[in-house]
Amino acid sequence: MTIDALIMFVGAFIATLPFLGFPIRMDNIIMVVTGIIVISLGIIIRRRAVAARARAKRVHTYVESAPQVRGEVHETA
């Protein structure tokens, strides 16, 4: 199960939670636990996105030398 599907499943569970017939105390505990799950999944997604951006920057970084014409020497600043 992907993280996106898991977030949708938890969201659907939160939407149906009031209709499941749990006592209010149990309902509150379940709501807090599912909230913590959603927060942690959001953190995981954000870390993966930041790591993917960092990998993309590393892959496309290169340096080319200045072309040299025969007999001329180019100096770099």
Image: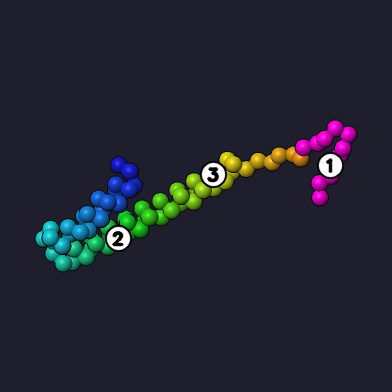
Residue 16 in the image: x percent, y percent? 17, 57
Q: Which residue is mark 2?
A: 35
Tell me the crowding category of disc 2: few under 14, some 14 to 19, or many 20 or more residues within 10 angstroms, Cα based. some
Residue 70 spot, x, y in % from top left: 85, 32
Is the residue under label 2 in contact with that under label 1 (CB below 8 Å)? Answer: no
Give the magenta-colored segment's residue range.
67-77
Give residue 56's mark. 3
Q: Secondary structure at mark 3?
A: helix
Compared with residue 26, is residue 57 higher up or lower down, i.e. above or below?
A: above
In the rendering, at what x and y percent does residue 11 appear? Answer: 25, 55
The residue nearer to you, when weighing 27 against 63, is 63
Q: Amino acid at mark 1?
A: His
Distance between mark 1 and mark 2 Cα atoms: 62 Å
- Residue 49 part of the magenta-drawn span: no
Amino acid bearing label 3 = Ala
Q: Secondary structure at mark 2?
A: helix
Tell me which secondary structure the magenta stretch mostly adopts: loop
Residue under label 1, please give it: 74
Residue occupying image coordinates x 71% and y 39%: 64
